[in-house]
Amino acid sequence: MEQNDIRKLLQSVADGSVSVDDAVLHIKAEPFAELGYAKPDCHRGVRQGVPEVIYGEGKTTEQIIGITKALIDHGQKTVLITRLDKDKAEAVNREVVLDYHEMGHIAVAGEMPKERKGKIVIATGGTSDMPVAEEAAVTAEALGNNVVRLYDVGVAGIHRLLSHTGDIMSARAVIAIAGMEGALASVIGGLADCPVIAVPTSVGYGAAFGGVAALLSMLNSCASGVSVVNIDNGFGAAYQASMINKMGD
Amino acid sequence: MEQNDIRKLLQSVADGSVSVDDAVLHIKAEPFAELGYAKPDCHRGVRQGVPEVIYGEGKTTEQIIGITKALIDHGQKTVLITRLDKDKAEAVNREVVLDYHEMGHIAVAGEMPKERKGKIVIATGGTSDMPVAEEAAVTAEALGNNVVRLYDVGVAGIHRLLSHTGDIMSARAVIAIAGMEGALASVIGGLADCPVIAVPTSVGYGAAFGGVAALLSMLNSCASGVSVVNIDNGFGAAYQASMINKMGD
Amino acid sequence: MEQNDIRKLLQSVADGSVSVDDAVLHIKAEPFAELGYAKPDCHRGVRQGVPEVIYGEGKTTEQIIGITKALIDHGQKTVLITRLDKDKAEAVNREVVLDYHEMGHIAVAGEMPKERKGKIVIATGGTSDMPVAEEAAVTAEALGNNVVRLYDVGVAGIHRLLSHTGDIMSARAVIAIAGMEGALASVIGGLADCPVIAVPTSVGYGAAFGGVAALLSMLNSCASGVSVVNIDNGFGAAYQASMINKMGD
Amino acid sequence: MEQNDIRKLLQSVADGSVSVDDAVLHIKAEPFAELGYAKPDCHRGVRQGVPEVIYGEGKTTEQIIGITKALIDHGQKTVLITRLDKDKAEAVNREVVLDYHEMGHIAVAGEMPKERKGKIVIATGGTSDMPVAEEAAVTAEALGNNVVRLYDVGVAGIHRLLSHTGDIMSARAVIAIAGMEGALASVIGGLADCPVIAVPTSVGYGAAFGGVAALLSMLNSCASGVSVVNIDNGFGAAYQASMINKMGD
Amino acid sequence: MEQNDIRKLLQSVADGSVSVDDAVLHIKAEPFAELGYAKPDCHRGVRQGVPEVIYGEGKTTEQIIGITKALIDHGQKTVLITRLDKDKAEAVNREVVLDYHEMGHIAVAGEMPKERKGKIVIATGGTSDMPVAEEAAVTAEALGNNVVRLYDVGVAGIHRLLSHTGDIMSARAVIAIAGMEGALASVIGGLADCPVIAVPTSVGYGAAFGGVAALLSMLNSCASGVSVVNIDNGFGAAYQASMINKMGD
Amino acid sequence: MEQNDIRKLLQSVADGSVSVDDAVLHIKAEPFAELGYAKPDCHRGVRQGVPEVIYGEGKTTEQIIGITKALIDHGQKTVLITRLDKDKAEAVNREVVLDYHEMGHIAVAGEMPKERKGKIVIATGGTSDMPVAEEAAVTAEALGNNVVRLYDVGVAGIHRLLSHTGDIMSARAVIAIAGMEGALASVIGGLADCPVIAVPTSVGYGAAFGGVAALLSMLNSCASGVSVVNIDNGFGAAYQASMINKMGD
Amino acid sequence: MEQNDIRKLLQSVADGSVSVDDAVLHIKAEPFAELGYAKPDCHRGVRQGVPEVIYGEGKTTEQIIGITKALIDHGQKTVLITRLDKDKAEAVNREVVLDYHEMGHIAVAGEMPKERKGKIVIATGGTSDMPVAEEAAVTAEALGNNVVRLYDVGVAGIHRLLSHTGDIMSARAVIAIAGMEGALASVIGGLADCPVIAVPTSVGYGAAFGGVAALLSMLNSCASGVSVVNIDNGFGAAYQASMINKMGD
Amino acid sequence: MEQNDIRKLLQSVADGSVSVDDAVLHIKAEPFAELGYAKPDCHRGVRQGVPEVIYGEGKTTEQIIGITKALIDHGQKTVLITRLDKDKAEAVNREVVLDYHEMGHIAVAGEMPKERKGKIVIATGGTSDMPVAEEAAVTAEALGNNVVRLYDVGVAGIHRLLSHTGDIMSARAVIAIAGMEGALASVIGGLADCPVIAVPTSVGYGAAFGGVAALLSMLNSCASGVSVVNIDNGFGAAYQASMINKMGD
């Protein structure tokens, strides 16, 4: 239900076509499915233009199946399930057909969008950042965006990055993914003329503190136009990059 | 032994019906069972109105059985055992009959209270917070309170929470349980007219730091009337909520 | 506006006595004053039973005066202003008469409640915790509660605390305020049969880390029935203690 | 110099109209002014579409004047100077005319853009967040964007925020600014259908840790579509919001 | 009152020479002075062999004077006041004669002990650690111990320390005081055959984090026989060293 | 070799009975065994009165056997091996006979001292702290001290601790072991008239942060006479307590 | 490609022997191998004098084989693979012959340099630091340096270190490796007249925080001439030590 | 005294030309001046090739004058005094002539070396890093090194840095100084073929945490050949860079 729907409902109450109690019930009952253990937000596609996504970690196989079915029953065409390990994916797949991407620990139920638009560049500092990058890439594709992958372009050999300046300059959004010191985001931030969304990864050891070094580095980027999401949050970066990319249409 | 008991004992000493040495012995010997590895507080029901609870983590099966029996021998009717994993629960069950709740990792020896009073609302931000919520719920029920469960009402789809405003407004205490950014506590804190006890959970990843993000969020709640317990401490929240709920009788 | 008011408004729309546009306007316009720099919540007394409080830190004198007047204009009888330093208090006092409590950096505009109820005990570990304790005490009194002050009863000389067991046993809520290692909360938590709200203070040096040591200590209290508010948050503790105390009436 | 310029330069070398040494010199000499203590990036307007901005903190008055003049000499029309305290602003103003905004500690040399486009909403949790919000607002306006200010709409009185749903739903980018627990970002993130850039502020005390609580909260937002910039970084949020807003033209 | 006193009191109650109410009163009234803002522990000399000490920080001049007088009135001969800045010391001195040691920010009211026993070595890594060292030295002397000062014997020039091996080998307790990396404690711990009490200081900058680096270093000492007190806590180290030193008599 | 030995060696050089090269060799060669992977300090018994102890963690079975044999070969009668898990203990036992204490993960090679002196009290907050307590107890006994165990006397039921005041008052050193909030150290510190060595344990969860909460609590103890060792360092506490206890002979 | 190569290429463009498009292609295509998942830097030997090294952690066996082969195909003689666990090493070995060093988790493909120069001393605080030390030692040897190993020379028995003063005084670079309190770096820093590179290790427990205590200790070394690399980063220390050692030729 | 001196002394004892007591005295008395509050290390020039440096912070004017004079009296030609604020510098200057460098808060007593060798490049990310850079530059010059300053070459405009590749490629050591995200060290580390010493600075705000973000970034550099010193430690970096630079002679 959007704002306009509320106004319409009030008018129906005013002209007597809807009773007060029904109106209260309607506002309360509609926008999510009540599963007891979960309340999937069926309202989100209308409200935010992107349908509900399932965060798989910490949910049982039964819960994931239940939520996926509920969303499909409410008419959602593509259901993304993130942070899903291989075993659970196989178990879910017995009930709901999944397209599972092992590197990114992400699955898609339903169909992928037929058309993809614009251009999102996904760059990583190293090979070890690929699981996060693939979570981002599959998410972006599932949301209908064209994706260019630039993997292992970390700043220790800056000529590798500079050789791809063309891709970076022509993107509508860049997702910069790096662990260790996370310097990639700053260098890309100084080259790109579109928003850069930085994703620190937990790649590294010792004083990398599971991604904290990269996170702080990215938050303090001396380049403007860089914002940051949580450590290893490829999904979140792709979600926002998709919003930005589509604004350019 | 309460203050009055001490005064009575002193009077018995004064009138000669109790000797000095017996009095000293009595004060020392009574209020806990001496098991060597543990000193269960049999005094607590008298002193605080709630009997001793066993924290299962880090205790051996033998120790848990020993303490449970000691408490039952001292007349305690309901013995709660928290943080008890399934394997230990089964081992204990061979010696002392347990009602084990797997989701909340909590067991009850003895009988549950027949009567339940008042109303405690237990709300969670997501499905993954359920283990903590169930620890709280079973504790609250074992202490004789009515419980209403509102699971998966996180603020990202705030209409889910607002649709339950009635429950929140009529509670005597609300337990707000959330991981990630823990914003649920603040929003409920702004709606409720009763004390809100916030429980940060270790749900999340990266900069959630095992519940620290939610903990800090809740400690800094811009809503008044919110206090906080330790990360994942469903038991502690329910214990205090029970104290508050019973004050309303 | 409470739930019932919304239902009444909808019925007025239904019976034609209120137009749809007026209803929308009413819902939007009423519950807070729009000052541009602030939106004081005039709705809060109805919704939560306690009127809006002004957090003085980071606000200019002009803003404080403006918000105070707006609240009084909306009919609020007692306006608490916390975290107000002496200079600002004097400046505000020229426009709105204040009763300023220097130790607690807290002021009251309007009148204090005539009647006080129940019993809240406020205990501190040391003399240096008094600013936080007085913020709590004045808040509790302004909200209509009887307050008993037990200052400097830290656990290093535990006989000082034990000599006040009577007060603690007869309270409806205890506020335990301590810096350094914050052990006071645990010891009181083991003695009291009512909720204990612990307030860590920034008293201490070195590894006290501005109250973090006491905060962690209180969050990990081995005593049940203890919840915690932010470092130095005397106001927040008193607010919740007041809710609890009044439940006992 | 952009990629195309480099290709042109190479062609000029190829056709003999530019010598090899001149080409090397040209690439090295052009894109920044060499002041010894600073190398302002005159190249940035061409490369990134937004001219160089001066970060005032830690620079002497003489340095700020020198850099400002160098940028104006290179043809930059609007020069933003952030983190500039009042005393320095007055000193600089004697040499270069500034439009100084005291609340946001930000100054503009040269002229503001005549035309403003699109819609950026800037929302704050409280009145005390205004300095950061004004830094963002002036930046956004200086970069040619329309700005809507929604101040003091924190989640403790969520009706204040909900009454502005219309503004949030119609924005191209929302900047959510909050200290304390920073829950505002999550709630707005759940309402908006455009990118939300969250700015934690250092407003708060105790366990707010100078903005860390809000920062962690925002990084862990359960709402999708939220990215985060550094604590108190109003400028950075506005810079990226401007990039996004202009993509919608 | 010690345990024996309690037994005697009970016997007096038993033989009727003391009434029950008087006994209760006696237990409650005696062991501390009730000043409202403070409860100085007059009982401590009996219980712990060392009289009450006043922690000056965060107390007003009036409070310090009041507590000092109360202790002297209860018969305490030497009153130590720690963390006392020069201005307050002068103000207090007008009411109670003080011997003030500026380097250590510590004052003595009453008389110093006539006899000093044993040998405590106080060693520092550098000259900048002297304020903490002098707090320790004056405390140790006020408690009746002989003190040997070894200042600026940090490990970067280890020959300076090794040249004093004799002093270290003949001490009954060594207080090792160092900031920065705090390595002094480990090296002394490997040389001494008596307990070493390590005091980290806040000397240093950057990643010294106000003494945290030295604190962690000392807690992880690879030498056995080293224990640690709070950052800059010269008093605490001297207090325990005095207990140890006297055990050797 | 002690100082006196060096002087004697120099005199032998002076009177020609030892050549210069032999003297240099002697100083270098004697005080440790050279095993390549380790240099066990055979000198320590002479220098510090307590023989070398083996820290088992991170060493291979072969290394532990090698070092143990080297120490025994150099005449050491009792060899303590700490942090030794059960599997390694069994493997070592095949080569060197061990007396293994599973609860404390500690083994003794050689013989225990026949005579034990003085009195060390080892108190724990809870049953779960026993592994650390037993590491301390076995160490203290192996070093020739009498030990009194007071387990599960945490402050949440303070009568349990107070009932043992006699033991605490008559000890020469108390080791206070606690996890969670670690308040035990402060309360004992206020009761005892001997040095208290506090050992924080990693018992607890959430904001206990693996013992950090207890560590900070103990470092900030409001009681004087308390010093602290590393988290879970039962060995270190017993080592220093032994030094103190023996000073009382 | 080095600077001179670029100048030559430009001249070829100028004299027409190379076309513009070929020049662009050449700059882009040459300096790294494009494997999709990785871009090994074949350029590095020319640019930095040390060939590319493979960081094994987080890479699949297939990726490691692929990168190793690519480097060998580009003519690299010695390929170091760090952080390689035993299982992966065996799997890789089936495709590319490896010399695997289990203690240091490091492998060498190709041949080791025939000649070794200068002198690098590698010292450790304890036996448990050997895995890091061996990573450093094998790296240094693979880069053509002579290595002297001084293991288990921690400061708790400082005579062990002092007996090796000769080695330390004659080195061109010292790598000081220690966990726990990391004091070794400071003591060596005070003895050596060459650069000391300190490596904190994750050896220790409790407040060692996985190497943080040693890291902070080393960063705050009171000795000059000490710099620090990441926790457990034996490779990085050896790499820089090799650069320094070779400067002495 | 070096090793050889000790051997000579022993031989003098052997041939009777020096008595045992004199030898003991000589070893003890020579290598540092005993000032009571300080023991300046006159031995260091012989032992480490660089004379003693005075760390000014936390020392009184009198102490600085005393130590400077003692060093000059022992024949030291150049005395560096770091971390010296302007007021103290002026006060010292009245007793000992100083050449004071205000930007770097560093002073030189005595004469600067006449000859400078090799090449050290000092690069900064921004203008605000200049105080640290100048501390490094003056130190390096005082130790006899040629210095090239490259200020404000941060990675947000990477062409500024790349235009100085020649300087970086020809240096014997590079000092990379940066605050905020500290990415400069990694990019330079990937370009240089000599050791890079990284200095994090406290420049920045919010999540820069006074230099921690840059420190972690530099410790986790993906470039090899980078080591790190303490935050703002320009002196330490220059000291080690000087050692390295001179090795190249």
Image (tube, coloured by chain):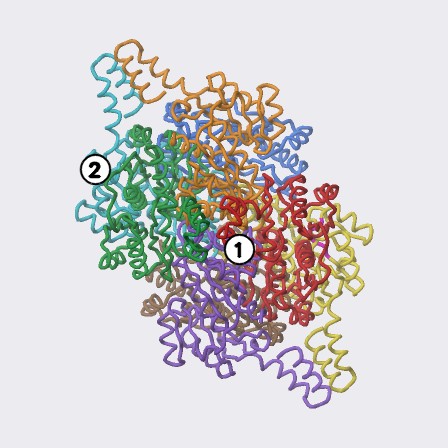
Chain colours: A cyan, B green, C orange, D blue, E red, F purple, G brown, H yellow
Q: Nearer the viewer, residue D236 or G181?
A: G181
Residue at image x 42%, y 65%? G81
Tell me the chain of label 1. E
Crowdedness near tag 1: few (<14), some (14–19) or many (≥20) residues, C-alpha within 10 Å? few
Crowdedness near tag 2: few (<14), some (14–19) or many (≥20) residues, C-alpha within 10 Å? many
Q: Nearer the viewer, mark 2 or mark 1?
A: 1
Residue H91 percent coordinates (x, y): 79, 48
Q: Secondary structure at mark 1?
A: helix
Say if G199 sits above or below F95 in the image: above
Magenta stretch prevailing secondary structure: strand
Q: Amino acid at mark 1?
A: Lys
The single residue placed furthest to the top in the displayed view is C17
Residue at image x 35%, y 40%? B177
Residue G220 percent coordinates (x, y): 59, 57
Residue A71 percent coordinates (x, y): 22, 37
Badge 1 is on which residue?
Answer: E8
Say if C108 sits above or below G87 in the image: above
Q: Nearer the viewer, residue B125 or E6?
A: E6
Badge 2 is on which residue?
Answer: A70
Asked whether, in this view, residue D101 is left or right of residue C238, the answer is right
Q: CA distance from mark 2 to mark 1?
A: 76 Å
Q: Nearer the viewer, residue C129 or G122?
A: C129
Say if H61 sits above or below D58 in the image: below
**Residue C132 sits in quarter:** top right
